[in-house]
Amino acid sequence: MFDKPLFSQRQLKIIMVVTAVAIVLLSATGQRPSLPEIESRQLGSAPLYWMDDNSEESLVSFSFTLPGNRSGNGLSLRLAQQFLLQDLEAAFQDSTTQPLGVNVKAHHNRLQIQLKLDNDEPLDPIVTQLLEALNTPVSSKRWSEAKQKQQAQIYLDHQSEKPGWYQLRSWMHPQQATDNPDYSQWLEFQRNLFSRHQLRIALTSSESEALMKPLQIFVERLPEGKSWPDYPEAMLSPQHQQLTTLDGHQLLLGRHSLGRSQSGFAAQMLAVRTIQQSARELGIYSQWQPSGQHSELILYASSTSLLTPQRLLQAIDKSLKNLDEKALEDAQEKMLDQFYQRLESPQTRHEQLEAIAFYQLPLNYQQQFVDELEQLSPSQLSTQIGDLLDGQQYHWIQFVPAS
């Protein structure tokens, strides 16, 4: 009744052992899988980056750039994201052709719409529905009601934040303005956000060429838009503040580090990861947010005794001084392994492509990243760590109990 198995139990065990040995040998000899080839072209004024994928599903991201004086957590984008999600749901509700998944994600500098598609389904009707959602008018009544609710949520979010975070962000992003538009100002923001001028596209698919035409149509049907006003990334000299609190001692620190588009980013990323691991072991919260020109490193700690920036950074530095060359090399290998492991997942592979497309990085950016990591020596890594722990580069807010 049943077909004869291709392999006996004994043969299967042999295959499993041989496979495991092969993986160990490849790791030991430093051999890793080939990096995916990335290609790009212009669809009108919108850059498209794509890579071929053997999956039965395709992933496409439409990423729209925010102006430099707005954040992904601000009121303007929260409203745009809310209305888009509602209008997408309405557009797809009665359609016979739907994407397998839709995700609308607000980053700190862009809004990303990601679609998961069945390769057997045509993209044309889905593009039409997406355009319908993007172009759905927002009435003043609907906008006013949503604005009140979002403002209340923003207030609650600020209340739940760690002390001083709002102040620290204002020091690290002094170019960002108060985000409280009226109805007409917001409509202008929305129209220019969802335009060809702000768009970057990333595509991961085994059917890339077949999807080019509907993507071209999508771009052509968007409004042209215009450049956002120029808001240079202002860099304040380190700011310091001491405040009293009814709670225990607390300390919040933040500094800029290299961005994705800068030389040395991979080495500094490893240094940041190493610092974060040490901070975690010491009970210090850390957050790192990479961006184009500048990334951000945030550290936060609380204690029953006095906390100073010098004492906190020295504690991290002291714990890392105990790492020998072997430990630093292991950290380097671990990060390389994690990089390649992320490429095994279609979703995380696409996320990397989306970042490359958004920042319009070189097509061989992944190879450059790997080469930089592989060439990093333990002493160079130690130097990077020391530079990142330089207390003179940090903004900080110190909280001390009221006497």
Image: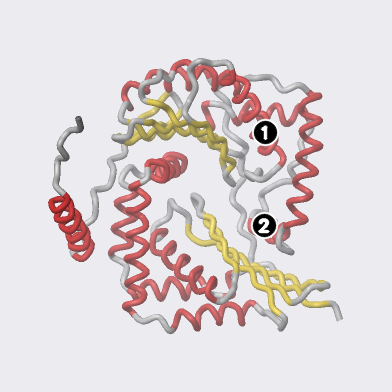
For residue 137, above or below residue 176: above
The residue lying furthest to the right in this view is 403
Q: Residues within 10 Å of mark 1 (few under 14, many from 20)?
A: few
Q: Residues within 10 Å of mark 2 (few under 14, many from 20)?
A: few
Amino acid of disc 2: Arg
Q: Position of residue 161 (x, y in %)?
A: 71, 58
Residue 169's label in the rendered image is 2
For residue 261, above or below residue 1: below
Q: Position of residue 1 (x, y in %)?
A: 20, 30
Work out which quarter of the rendered image holds the C terminus and state it: bottom right
Which element carries disc 1, helix, strand or loop?
Answer: helix
For residue 356, above or below residue 311: above
Quadrant in the rendering for residue 203: top left
Closer to the camera, 359 or 270?
Answer: 270
Closer to the camera, 215 or 363?
Answer: 215
Write down the residue under mark 1.
82
